[in-house]
Image (cartoon, coloured by chain):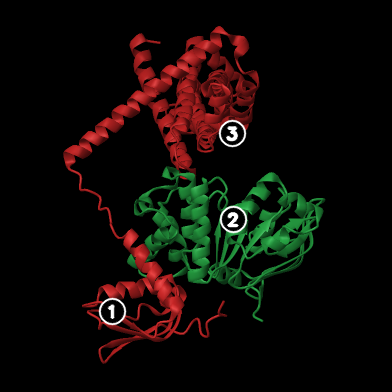
Chain colours: A green, B red
Amino acid sequence: MATPVIEVRGLRTQFGLKVVHEDLDFSVRRGEIVALVGGSGSGKTTLLREITMLDAPSAGSVRLFGEETVGIGEAAAFALRRRFGMMFQLGALFSSLTVRENVAVPLREHTRLPAALIDDIAELKIALAGLPPDAAERYPAQLSGGMIKRAAVARAIALDPDLLFLDEPTAGLDPVGAAALDELVLQLRDTLGLTVVIVTHDLDTLWRVTDRVAFLGERRVLACEPMPVLTRSEHPLIRAYFTGPRARAAAAAQA
Amino acid sequence: MPDAPPEPLAPPLAECQAGRVRLAGAWTVTALSAHGDPLPAGELPTCFDASALGALDTTGALLLVHAEGRCAGAVAWEGLRDEHAELLDLVRRHRHAAAPHADAASVGVLALLGRDTCRRLAEARDILAFLGEACVACWRALLLPHRLRLTPLLANVQRAGFEALPIVGLLSFLMGIVIAYQGGQQLRTYGASLFVVDLVTLTMLREMAVILTAIIVAGRTGSAYTAQIGTMRVTEEIDALRTIGIRPLDLLVVPKIFALVLVLPLLTVYADMMGVFGGMFIADLMFGVSFTEFLQRLEQVVSLRHFLVGVGKAPVFALLIALVGCYQGFKVSGGADAVGRQTTVSVVQAIFLVIVVDAAFSVLFSALRV
């Protein structure tokens, strides 16, 4: 069996006296779409930031593509970073650049392709993310919330990464836009062979898109199972999460 | 899911032989960036052989789709793997979507002139509107002083006034030293060292202290006003205030104007004292004018009106700095970039206006013979 794309072992995160993660294990195989769920404050975003080398864990090991990232050198981290893309919750587009320039930033930084080709690639990614062509020339302040998310996805996939992180991709989107973003994620995985990690609360996304769902609670991953298995779990936290009226409606829609 | 392709970094190759293009290696963004576009220039044969093609990503697919466009006719693909065909299809579909390139229509000089005129007129109208609103808000606060927001007012007094004391004091002291030193050397050659007192006290009290203080405050406080209000606009906090029913001007602008109008004259008085003290220090040290002599001479030279000419300008400058700072803050739209730009504009404009208005005061005072 191939090495997992992400392998987290014995992770511990502590802010002051508050322990967020303790002895947390989590792994993602190549080509999988895995969601991270859990109540607010269960450390989903923190875990994501530790996997993407934005924050260092207090203890434990995080391997990306089989390479240890805790205590990694500057050059090795740089090389690893170009193999994954990250979409931030609020887009985090550079406000002084147009959408096209935003998407071109990683390409300009990491490749020596000619400028004309970079512009072409950026436009292709913008189209792939489902934005209309005229969006390329606009500034982030001139975009709607849904378009910002799509532009952020376009920037995250600029370098054809092997691994894509999405932080709440459908939060704040209308149902049509959210469904379209779900389809986009599936399409990217199927055609580009991406591995995708999603932090989300969107139950429709969980049912529609994910192969497995990791449930964070009690400072660790309580379970990492496909949705149908996870929703039948006996664990009280997981039961509470998936038996609310909204969860039942989403499950019923899926059945 | 297929496992990792065998050689992801094999250089991309494209050989034209016998009426066909033979593709090989990895056509990925990494490989293409390292080795360059392998496709030969000019027209290409219409048969692409992809049986030896290794990895392919969207960048490689885009180049191949570009290459298809350079062929005389429709391209026949041979040995293309299913997932690669799918990727090429995906790129072709979305290339079409991106194709219509909206060229910016060329604009005539007259149109540019008209556009610029409209923009400037609109800006002039905005400034007048802001000035009017700020006046109304200040008037309301004066009529109903109990509604004046005391906490932000005092916080502004502390930040703009008290915390500026060290820098204002030090710079005025140094300015006094410089004026006394430079002027005193010239005066000494005429044996008129005592006149260093006139020189230092009159320049400090009438001009230097208030200008220096206003420039420091514009740089320290005016910029902070713009950045604060600008950031609040970006994060929609201003709109939130409006929906709660708090007038942003009442909360954000009025306390700032009152605080600065209160504080700048006080800072000017402090700068007066420190500047004169700097001059006194140098006069004693280098030109043999003792402190006692200096103070005696000072009493003869300086009358109340000299002091008032300087300090009287301070509230006007304070008003300018606060209004420009707040106005530029409200003009921010967009993101972090706009905050920075507007802050720069705010400081430049405030200092510019302070100096221009000071010149106007000089003309006015000389006409009035004060």
Name the image quarter holding residue B288: top right
Binning the other alpha carbons within 10 Å of mark 2 as few (below 14), some (14 to 19) or many (20 upward) gives many
Residue A84 x, y percent position in the rendering? 56, 66
Amino acid type, residue under disc 3 in the picture: Ile
SS for callout 3: helix
The chain holding disc 1 is: B
SS for callout 1: loop
Circles 1 and 2 on the same subunit: no
Residue in view at x 46 percent, y 76 percent: B83
What's the distance in space between the residues labelled 3 and 1, CA to CA? 74 Å
* Residue position marked by numbered label 3 in the rendering: B167
Q: Is residue B75 left or right of residue A139?
A: left
Amino acid type, residue under disc 1 in the picture: Val
* Residue position marked by numbered label 1 in the rendering: B75
Q: Is residue B7 above or below residue B298?
A: below
Binning the other alpha carbons within 10 Å of mark 1 as few (below 14), some (14 to 19) or many (20 upward) gives some
Q: Is residue A238 left or right of residue B46?
A: right
The chain holding disc 2 is: A
Residue B199: tell me if it is visible: no
